[in-house]
Image (spheres, coloured by chain):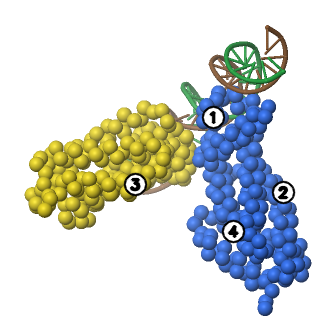
Chain colours: A blue, B yellow, C brown, D green
DNA sequence: GAATTTCCGACCCATTTGTTCTACACAATT
DNA sequence: AATTGTGTAGAACAAATGGGTCGGAAATTC
């Protein structure tokens, strides 16, 4: 009973690995169960269907991302550094995620709406985080934003803009230099001039 | 008619890519043909079966390897350098091949005998190459091998010994340093002491 | 030792997949 | 113009694969 939840995450972890390698479609329940050294039907004791496993994987991944982002903020003190860290980690993680989903999804596919649902839920969270960062930075006098809500939304828009090439292009983009450029732009537009 | 052979290699190339990603079993004819923008049944005009394509891929890969090795020898002049280059490239290529076959083969599998056939055929070639290298080196006075045949066989045995961990272990091995050690051993055992 | 939890082999059946077959389009050749 | 040869693909099909169910063994807990 306490183990059950634990075993569920074990399933999630291994399934995630196989999904990322072979994609959702090509991954079979047989494989997942074999990797867990269990019978195929045993898996159904923990999850109702293959899709259910997949949803759990996505949810898990989303929480992972959330955690990494919040710790990224806590790692440093000053608001500019917090913002920089946040954006940096966000980019890195999204690059990883884009790899994951490119591998997992069949090129068509209708699973996108599911991801979109998760994503839109996190959008609000992200906005709150950014708003707080901007607000704190402004009240400490290191940022100079008139309205932290709209400023946060603007930043978020920029960040989303950076996702597009990640998810649609195959070409290797020099993430780091692009990142520097973006950060530079944000800071020089937002940091109080002396 | 001249195009036909050309198109066969195009099939081989694309099939190889998909095989290496998804493995033989999970790769479907549908996928291969889709990647080639042809109808599924059209592929059968060029190859009799999925297995036949796979055999062609392996054969192609083997020839690729042979070429890389012979050019590796020609790149340098002195016998020790030739030997070093040969072993170096051989290791690198085998590391790549091991990745390929680990990805392509289902963990069981009876395809091994097929690979073994190809391999044993190349064994003789390799032995001839090594023997020549040793022989030339000895007659130039830079090596000191009593019997180039048996020396070559000894070297080949060592090289095979290095394959084992490549194909069976997952752990990342530091190829370069191991390589240096082996080369050092071979040379200090074979180079005429002053 | 009964109850409950966890596991699995055997089965079901819809879908997939390797392969065959036939027919069609288009050139080249007769 | 008819024939032959080359390349293509759609339809059809038998075999397999794979997701999911079920009844009941094992194992664990009470």
Q: Which residue is mark 1?
A: A36
Mark-to-mark CA distance, 3 and 4: 33 Å
Q: Nearer the viewer, mark 1 or mark 3?
A: 3
Q: Earlier in the sequence, mark 2 or mark 4?
A: 4
Circle 4 chain: A
Near mark 1 (Cα within 10 A), the count class, few <14, some 14-19 or many ≥20, is some
Q: Are marks 1 and 3 on the same chain?
A: no
Instruction: Give the camera-side residue of B126 and A106.
Output: B126
Near mark 2 (Cα within 10 A), the count class, few <14, some 14-19 or many ≥20, is few
Q: Which residue is mark 4?
A: A88
Mark-to-mark CA distance, 2 and 1: 32 Å
Mark-to-mark CA distance, 4 and 1: 35 Å
Q: Which residue is mark 3?
A: B175
Where is residue B31 shown, x and y percent of the image? 56, 46
Q: Are marks 3 and 4 on the same chain?
A: no
Circle 2 chain: A
Count of picture labels:
4
Q: Nearer the viewer, mark 2 or mark 4?
A: 4
Q: Earlier in the sequence, mark 4 or mark 1?
A: 1
Rendered position, A149 above or below B70: below
* Callout 1: SS: loop
Tag 3–tag 2 contact (CB < 8 Å):
no
Where is residue B33 shown, x and y percent of the image? 53, 48
Instruction: Give the camera-side residue of B100 and D25.
Output: D25
Q: Which residue is mark 2?
A: A121
Rendered position, A189 above or below B64: below
Residue for point 80% across, 86% down: A192
Where is residue B85 shown, x and y percent of the image? 28, 60
């Amino acid at each position: 009973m306490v183990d059950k939840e634990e075993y569920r995450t074990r399933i999630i972890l291994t399934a995630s690995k196989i999904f990322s390698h072979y994609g959702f479609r090509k991954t079979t329940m047989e494989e997942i169960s074999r990797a867990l050294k269990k019978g195929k039907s045993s898996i159904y004791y923990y999850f109702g269907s293959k899709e259910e496993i997949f949803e759990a994987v996505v949810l898990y991944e989303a929480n992972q991302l959330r955690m990494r982002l919040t710790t990224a903020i806590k790692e440093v003190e000053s608001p500019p550094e917090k913002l920089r860290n946040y954006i940096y980690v966000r980019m890195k993680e999204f690059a990883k995620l884009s790899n994951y989903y490119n591998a997992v999804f069949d090129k068509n596919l209708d699973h996108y709406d599911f991801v979109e649902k998760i994503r839109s839920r996190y959008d609000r969270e992200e906005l709150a985080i950014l708003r707080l960062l901007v607000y704190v930075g402004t009240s400490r006098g290191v940022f100079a934003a008139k309205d932290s809500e709209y400023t946060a939304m603007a930043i978020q828009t920029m960040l989303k803009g950076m996702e597009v090439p990640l998810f649609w292009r195959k070409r290797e983009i020099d993430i780091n230099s692009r990142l520097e450029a973006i950060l530079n732009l944000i800071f020089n537009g937002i940091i109080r001039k002396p």
